[in-house]
Amino acid sequence: MTTNQLRQSMKIYYYECVPNSIHPKLLELFSQYTPCELIEAPQRLTAALKAWDGKYDLGSLVSIALEFEDCRILILSNVDSHFHRWCTDQYCDAHWGCSSEYISVDCAPDHSRLANQLHECLHFLGVQDCYVENDPRHPPKGSCTNPSCVMRYGVSSTDICDSVAEQVVQHSNILLKDEGRA
């Protein structure tokens, strides 16, 4: 039995501000790293996100709307939204999206959506960015040896580096330990 067969599937609800913005290959790509389900957001979450005006905490809104369900949320938006402002309020250089512990927002242009959605979802696995975050030039970290790594700033690729692969394995081992299977 493989590690992926042992682990529970990660549930990711997606909410589309812009119709048809979830990339059709995202599930296939992300499933390489962890078992997951990509599910359209339930009505109670959709209603709460539609009504959100950016004036109160997005994390609290999601937690209450989902009654603290164990899941992740991927919000697919654009740069003219409250969700984009939420990202740039948290991280001034988060022009195409951001990710917190269990909420990710994608605001990338169409030509970079798949790479950006994968980038934001990899954060759900505890993967760190492969660029220096407090440097406006966003140079790659020394640990990232792949110039096409999806976790670098501004890269529109779905490749990962060895450091990202190691972080995914570490996350998997933590989940197995937490589930009593390691």
Image (spheres, rainbow, N blue to C red):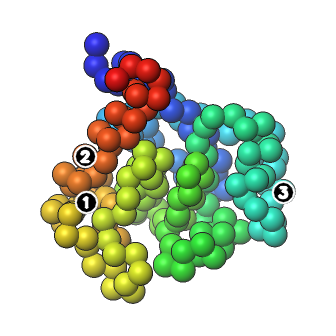
Q: Position of residue 71 (x, y in %)?
A: 61, 37
The dot on residue 166 is 2
Residue at x 60%, y 52% (from the top left corner): 103
Q: Residue drawn 56% across and 57% down?
A: 100
- Left or right of 175, for residue 19: right
What label sits on residue 124 in the rendered view? none
- 107 in relation to 26, above or below: below
Q: CA distance from mark 2 to mark 3?
A: 39 Å
Q: Quadrant of the N terminus?
A: top left
Q: Is residue 1 left or right of residue 57?
A: left
Residue type at the position of mark 2: Glu
Q: Nearer the viewer, mark 1 or mark 2?
A: 2
Q: Compute the Cα span from label 3 to label 1.
A: 36 Å
Q: Nearer the viewer, mark 2 or mark 3?
A: 2
Residue at disc 1, secondary structure: loop
Which circle's residue, 3 or 1, is located before the other in the chain? 3
Numbered mark located on residue 149 in the image: 1
Sequence-wise, the earlier of marks 2 and 3 is: 3
At which x and y percent is residue 20? 57, 48
Residue located farthest toward the left when viewing the structure as drawn = 145
Numbered circle sitting on residue 51:
3
